[in-house]
Image: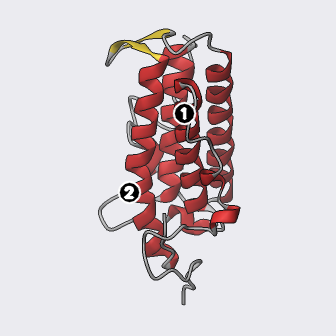
Amino acid sequence: MMVAMTTHSRRAEMFVPAEHDPRVLGPATGDERTLLNDFLGAQRATLELKCTGLGAELSQRSVAPSTLSLLGLLRHLADVERRWFRQVLAGQDVPPLFSSPADPDGDFSGAVPAPRVMADAWKAWRTETAFAEAFVTAAPHLDVEGQDSWRGTVSLRWVLIHMIEEYARHNGHADLLRERIDGSIGV
Protein backbone atom coordinates (compact mmCIF):
# COMPACT_ATOMS: atom_id res chain seq x y z
CA MET A 1 0.00 0.00 0.00
CA MET A 2 1.37 3.39 -1.00
CA VAL A 3 1.13 6.26 1.45
CA ALA A 4 0.72 9.76 0.09
CA MET A 5 3.51 12.22 0.89
CA THR A 6 1.01 15.05 1.11
CA THR A 7 -2.44 15.33 2.59
CA HIS A 8 -3.57 18.07 0.24
CA SER A 9 -7.13 18.16 -0.90
CA ARG A 10 -6.48 20.68 -3.70
CA ARG A 11 -3.90 20.47 -6.44
CA ALA A 12 -3.14 24.19 -6.11
CA GLU A 13 -1.68 23.74 -2.62
CA MET A 14 2.09 23.72 -2.29
CA PHE A 15 3.86 20.35 -2.54
CA VAL A 16 5.70 21.24 0.65
CA PRO A 17 4.70 23.86 3.25
CA ALA A 18 5.43 27.37 1.95
CA GLU A 19 7.86 28.10 4.78
CA HIS A 20 10.01 25.16 3.60
CA ASP A 21 9.58 25.70 -0.13
CA PRO A 22 12.71 27.06 -1.83
CA ARG A 23 10.68 28.07 -4.87
CA VAL A 24 8.86 30.96 -3.18
CA LEU A 25 11.87 32.73 -1.71
CA GLY A 26 13.14 34.40 -4.90
CA PRO A 27 12.69 37.98 -6.01
CA ALA A 28 9.52 39.30 -7.63
CA THR A 29 11.28 42.38 -9.00
CA GLY A 30 14.70 43.01 -10.46
CA ASP A 31 16.71 42.86 -13.63
CA GLU A 32 15.99 40.40 -16.41
CA ARG A 33 18.90 38.04 -15.67
CA THR A 34 17.95 37.77 -12.00
CA LEU A 35 14.31 37.02 -12.76
CA LEU A 36 14.99 34.51 -15.56
CA ASN A 37 17.59 32.74 -13.45
CA ASP A 38 15.22 32.60 -10.48
CA PHE A 39 12.34 31.24 -12.57
CA LEU A 40 14.62 28.54 -13.99
CA GLY A 41 15.87 27.75 -10.48
CA ALA A 42 12.29 27.36 -9.28
CA GLN A 43 11.53 24.96 -12.14
CA ARG A 44 14.62 22.92 -11.31
CA ALA A 45 13.60 22.87 -7.65
CA THR A 46 10.13 21.64 -8.64
CA LEU A 47 11.60 18.65 -10.46
CA GLU A 48 13.81 17.87 -7.48
CA LEU A 49 10.86 18.15 -5.06
CA LYS A 50 8.78 15.80 -7.20
CA CYS A 51 11.59 13.23 -7.01
CA THR A 52 12.36 13.68 -3.30
CA GLY A 53 11.96 10.71 -1.02
CA LEU A 54 11.82 8.14 -3.79
CA GLY A 55 14.17 5.27 -4.55
CA ALA A 56 13.43 2.65 -7.17
CA GLU A 57 9.99 4.26 -7.66
CA LEU A 58 11.76 6.97 -9.67
CA SER A 59 11.91 4.51 -12.55
CA GLN A 60 8.21 3.61 -12.42
CA ARG A 61 6.71 4.12 -15.89
CA SER A 62 3.59 6.15 -16.48
CA VAL A 63 1.51 3.71 -18.54
CA ALA A 64 2.43 1.06 -21.07
CA PRO A 65 3.94 1.37 -23.65
CA SER A 66 5.41 4.71 -22.49
CA THR A 67 8.94 4.85 -21.08
CA LEU A 68 8.16 8.12 -19.27
CA SER A 69 9.35 8.12 -15.65
CA LEU A 70 10.70 10.60 -13.11
CA LEU A 71 14.14 9.05 -13.52
CA GLY A 72 13.84 9.39 -17.29
CA LEU A 73 12.90 13.06 -16.88
CA LEU A 74 15.91 13.61 -14.64
CA ARG A 75 18.23 11.97 -17.19
CA HIS A 76 16.58 13.84 -20.08
CA LEU A 77 16.90 17.21 -18.37
CA ALA A 78 20.56 16.53 -17.52
CA ASP A 79 21.14 16.02 -21.25
CA VAL A 80 19.10 19.13 -22.12
CA GLU A 81 21.09 21.26 -19.66
CA ARG A 82 24.33 19.83 -21.10
CA ARG A 83 23.26 20.52 -24.68
CA TRP A 84 22.25 24.14 -24.27
CA PHE A 85 24.82 25.37 -21.77
CA ARG A 86 27.92 23.22 -22.46
CA GLN A 87 27.59 22.38 -26.14
CA VAL A 88 25.76 25.38 -27.61
CA LEU A 89 26.67 28.34 -25.41
CA ALA A 90 30.08 27.29 -24.06
CA GLY A 91 31.05 25.58 -27.33
CA GLN A 92 32.31 22.43 -25.61
CA ASP A 93 32.61 19.31 -27.73
CA VAL A 94 30.99 16.88 -25.29
CA PRO A 95 28.50 14.09 -26.07
CA PRO A 96 25.11 13.69 -24.43
CA LEU A 97 25.25 11.61 -21.26
CA PHE A 98 22.22 9.36 -21.69
CA SER A 99 21.11 9.46 -25.32
CA SER A 100 22.97 8.96 -28.57
CA PRO A 101 22.30 8.75 -32.30
CA ALA A 102 22.10 4.97 -31.91
CA ASP A 103 19.77 5.27 -28.89
CA PRO A 104 18.03 8.66 -29.10
CA ASP A 105 15.61 7.73 -26.30
CA GLY A 106 18.31 6.27 -24.05
CA ASP A 107 17.57 8.94 -21.45
CA PHE A 108 14.15 7.34 -20.92
CA SER A 109 14.64 3.72 -22.01
CA GLY A 110 17.75 3.40 -19.85
CA ALA A 111 16.01 4.72 -16.73
CA VAL A 112 15.97 1.45 -14.81
CA PRO A 113 15.72 0.99 -11.02
CA ALA A 114 19.39 0.09 -10.51
CA PRO A 115 21.08 2.07 -7.69
CA ARG A 116 24.02 3.01 -9.93
CA VAL A 117 21.72 4.28 -12.70
CA MET A 118 19.83 6.44 -10.21
CA ALA A 119 23.02 7.78 -8.58
CA ASP A 120 24.53 8.57 -11.99
CA ALA A 121 21.38 10.46 -13.02
CA TRP A 122 21.39 12.62 -9.88
CA LYS A 123 25.12 13.29 -10.18
CA ALA A 124 24.83 14.23 -13.86
CA TRP A 125 21.82 16.49 -13.32
CA ARG A 126 23.50 18.29 -10.41
CA THR A 127 26.76 18.65 -12.36
CA GLU A 128 25.00 20.05 -15.43
CA THR A 129 22.79 22.47 -13.48
CA ALA A 130 25.84 23.70 -11.54
CA PHE A 131 27.70 24.29 -14.81
CA ALA A 132 24.69 26.16 -16.22
CA GLU A 133 24.34 28.32 -13.11
CA ALA A 134 28.05 29.20 -13.21
CA PHE A 135 27.84 29.98 -16.92
CA VAL A 136 24.89 32.33 -16.42
CA THR A 137 26.62 34.08 -13.52
CA ALA A 138 29.86 34.56 -15.48
CA ALA A 139 28.22 35.68 -18.73
CA PRO A 140 28.75 39.41 -19.32
CA HIS A 141 25.18 39.84 -20.61
CA LEU A 142 22.16 37.91 -21.87
CA ASP A 143 23.09 38.51 -25.51
CA VAL A 144 25.96 35.99 -25.36
CA GLU A 145 25.45 33.75 -28.39
CA GLY A 146 26.07 30.17 -29.37
CA GLN A 147 25.51 28.11 -32.51
CA ASP A 148 22.95 25.32 -32.54
CA SER A 149 22.38 22.84 -35.36
CA TRP A 150 18.61 23.04 -34.80
CA ARG A 151 17.97 26.74 -34.13
CA GLY A 152 21.04 28.43 -35.59
CA THR A 153 22.32 31.36 -33.54
CA VAL A 154 20.76 31.52 -30.07
CA SER A 155 21.31 33.90 -27.20
CA LEU A 156 21.68 33.12 -23.51
CA ARG A 157 18.37 34.96 -23.04
CA TRP A 158 16.64 32.58 -25.48
CA VAL A 159 18.22 29.53 -23.83
CA LEU A 160 17.03 30.63 -20.37
CA ILE A 161 13.48 31.15 -21.64
CA HIS A 162 13.59 27.82 -23.49
CA MET A 163 14.87 26.02 -20.38
CA ILE A 164 12.04 27.48 -18.26
CA GLU A 165 9.58 26.22 -20.87
CA GLU A 166 11.30 22.81 -21.05
CA TYR A 167 11.17 22.30 -17.29
CA ALA A 168 7.62 23.62 -16.98
CA ARG A 169 6.39 21.12 -19.58
CA HIS A 170 8.20 18.21 -17.96
CA ASN A 171 7.20 19.26 -14.45
CA GLY A 172 3.61 18.76 -15.57
CA HIS A 173 4.58 15.19 -16.39
CA ALA A 174 6.35 14.94 -13.02
CA ASP A 175 3.14 16.01 -11.23
CA LEU A 176 1.23 13.12 -12.76
CA LEU A 177 4.04 10.60 -12.32
CA ARG A 178 4.46 11.45 -8.63
CA GLU A 179 0.73 11.28 -7.99
CA ARG A 180 0.66 7.83 -9.61
CA ILE A 181 3.53 6.63 -7.41
CA ASP A 182 2.26 7.66 -3.98
CA GLY A 183 -0.72 9.98 -4.38
CA SER A 184 1.25 13.15 -3.65
CA ILE A 185 -0.28 16.25 -5.20
CA GLY A 186 0.41 19.96 -5.07
CA VAL A 187 2.45 22.42 -7.08
- Residue 95 can be seen in this image: no
Q: Secondary structure at mark 1?
A: helix
174 and 141: which is toward the camera = 141
Which residue does the numbered mark 2 point to in the structure image?
67
Give how far across and how far down residue 102 sits, in percent.
Answer: 39, 32
**Tag 1 residue:** 35
Residue 137 in the image: state x and y as whole percent. 67, 22
Q: Residue at x 41, y 40 (%)?
A: 166
Relative to 132, is 173 above or below? below
The residue sitting at 38% across, 36% down in the picture is 104
Taking 181 as reference, is 169 above or below it?
above
Q: Is residue 150 left or right of residue 155?
A: left
* Closer to the camera in the image, 141 or 87: 141
Q: x, y (%) of residue 121?
A: 61, 46
Name which residue type carries label 2. Answer: Thr
Mark 1 neighbour density, 10 Å: few (under 14) some (14–19) many (20 or more): some
Q: Give the mark nearest the N terminus, 1 or 2.
A: 1
Q: CA distance from mark 1 to mark 2?
A: 34 Å
Provide residue 100's location: percent of width, then percent of height: 44, 31
- Callouts 1 and 2 close, C-beta under 8 Å: no
| Residue found at x 64% / y 20% | 135
